Image (tube, rainbow, N blue to C red):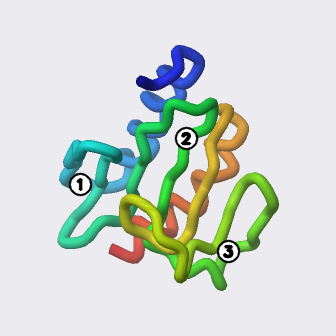
Amino acid sequence: MVPDCLQDLYGELDDALTAWREFEVQTLWHYVAYRLIVNRASVLRSPYEVILVYLTLDPDTAELKEDFTRDMRGVGHLGAGDLEVRIASATNLERAAPLIRRAFKAA
């Protein structure tokens, strides 16, 4: 269900999400949860050419940029987290790394 163009990017994202600490990775029907006691990141299994990552991070502490980050408070979505990060390339993944690190340091 994942486009071929995103297969490698999903692998790189998984490496980035598990690089800082030992987290439980739970594969669910629509997304993959990276968690300790609560989810710190939810990665949607998207059939589109973008990976949606929801981070347990206060959107007010991040600079929101169109087509990259989005405040999801009050918006229904799969997974957990108030900050949506859209990853469509390795460059986006590099831009997302500091946000991912902050979400996981808060755990």
Give the crowd class for mark 2: few <14, some 14-19, many >=20 residues within 10 Å.
many
In the picture, the disc for residue 11 is: none
Alpha carbon distance from label 2 to label 3: 19 Å
State yes or no: discs 2 and 3 in contact (Cβ < 8 Å): no
On screen, 37 above or below 98? below
Q: Which residue is mark 1?
A: 23
Left/right of residue 86 with respect to residue 54 in the rendered view: right
Alpha carbon distance from label 1 to label 2: 20 Å
Q: For the point 23% across and 54% down, which residue is it?
A: 23
Q: Give the residue type that dot 1 points to.
A: Phe
Q: Give the residue type that dot 3 points to.
A: Ala
Q: For the point 76% across and 53% down, which residue is it?
A: 67
Q: Which residue is mark 3?
A: 62
Left/right of residue 12 with respect to residue 65 in the rendered view: left
State yes or no: discs 3 and 1 in contact (Cβ < 8 Å): no
Q: Which residue is mark 2?
A: 51
Location of the N terminus (image quadrant): top left
Residue nearest the viewer, comparing 38 with 20 = 38
Quarter of the view holding residue 68:
bottom right
Alpha carbon distance from label 3 to label 1: 23 Å
Q: Give the residue type that dot 2 points to.
A: Ile
